[in-house]
Each structure stands twice: as structure tokens, then as C-alpha cells.
Amino acid sequence: MAEARKEAEVVMFGAVDELFEKTRVKPKDIGILIVNCSLFNPTTSLSAMVINHYKLRGNMLSYNLGGMGCSSGLIYIDLAKDLLQVHPNSLALVICKENITLNWYFGNDRSMLVSNCLFRMGGAAILLSNESWDRSRSKSRCTQLGLTKVLMTSASVVLPKERTPQGGLVFLCQRISWQLLGML
């Protein structure tokens, strides 16, 4: 658990530090924080780790969400967009990350090794604003957001967790198609 927490700190703080440096935004200016991680959701949440590390405001909106899979980043940007519509003159920080430390497979069973190839450590941070003076320096404008769900009957991905002979938990990939992997 300590290694997974350390991995989370490296990924999140690295992405947020780079974002703050590039945008010259101060942590106290953030009004909305959304943190997403599918596989690692500890008590003392990831959003609390960010709040404590950057000494964010006590009256900010904070959301720690998880377990929603690969497309969840878009869902959280949509959540931030909706929150910005009802909270004028705000900045929203969205952090999407993944943490594989607790689910890494060290054995030789090929069906269990696939998850090591699909899932890796990584993350990104994005800053959204509804403040009018940010328009001139923003990279893009969020006008419309959509998520398309595709059903493929010819292929399926089953990712149950299974205990390895060494005692760890890994994802077991039983049947998978390359077209579906391209959509992940």
C-alpha cells in the first residue's frame, strides 16, 4: 500500500506541478478539484492528498472518483464543465491517473501478463476555467463534450481479478480482440 501511495504522489504531484508552472496559477486559486483513479482508491483519498500537499482552500469543491475505467477522464471533464456552469469565476483542476502497483503480475501465465501490457502508471492534469480573462491565454475552448459507447458482439473483454500463486491480485484477460484494444 505504501508503494502504491508513493506512485500516486509521484504521478499526481508531477502532473500538477508542471501544470501550475506552465499556467502560473496559484494553488489557492483552485475552486474545484476532481481526482480520478480506476484501480487505486485509498482511504485518505487521493483528492485529500492533493488538498493537503498544495494547501488548497478549505471551501473548495472536492471530488474523488474511481472504478470507472479507461473512458472516465472524459466523464470527469464533463463533470468539471457542469460545475463551472453553476460556480462563476472558478478554476477547476481535473487529475486523471492510473496506478498499477497493487495489481502488477510477476508470474508467467500469459492470460495474466496481458494486464501488465494494457495498464501502466501515468496521469495528466488539466485546468478548466470560466473566468473571462482566461480566454486570451487558454489553449482551447470546451464547447461540446460527448461520449460514445460502442457495443461489439464479436469480441469481449473480461477483466476479473484473480489471485496468483504468489498471492497477488491481477486482472485476468480471457478473451480480447485487437479492434477492442484500440478503443481502450
Image (spheres, helix red, strand yellow):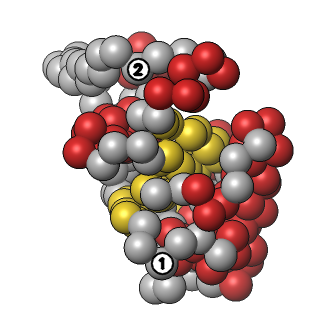
- Element type at mark 2: loop
Closer-to-camera residue (99/175): 99
Residue 91 at x, y percent in the picture: 49, 46
Which of pointers 2 and 1 indicates the residue nearer the eye? Answer: 1
Residue 144 at x, y percent in the picture: 30, 16
Residue 77 seen in this snapshot: yes
Residue position for label 2: 142
| Amino acid type at image mark 2 | Cys
Residue with the most extreme front position: 133
Residue appearing at x 41%, y 20% in the figure: 142
Tell me: residue 148, above or below residue 156.
above
Q: Which quadrant would residue 180 be assigned to in this image?
A: top left
Closer-to-camera residue (88/165): 88
Residue position for label 1: 58
Tell me: residue 155, above or below residue 78.
above
Residue appearing at x 44%, y 47% in the figure: 90
Residue 177 seen in this snapshot: no
Tell me: residue 130, above or below residue 59.
above
Residue 125 at x, y percent in the picture: 61, 44
Residue appearing at x 30%, y 48% in the figure: 87
The local crowd at label 2, few if under 14, some if 14 to 19, many if 20 or more residues have their Cα within 10 Å, is few
| Quadrant (top left/top right/bottom left/bottom right) for the N terminus | bottom right
Which of disc 1 and disc 2 is earlier in sequence? 1
Gap in angstroms between the C-alphas marked 2 and 1: 27 Å
Residue appearing at x 23%, y 45% in the figure: 86
The local crowd at label 1, few if under 14, some if 14 to 19, many if 20 or more residues have their Cα within 10 Å, is few
| Amino acid type at image mark 1 | Gly
In the figure, is residue 173 to the left or right of 84?
right
- Element type at mark 1: loop
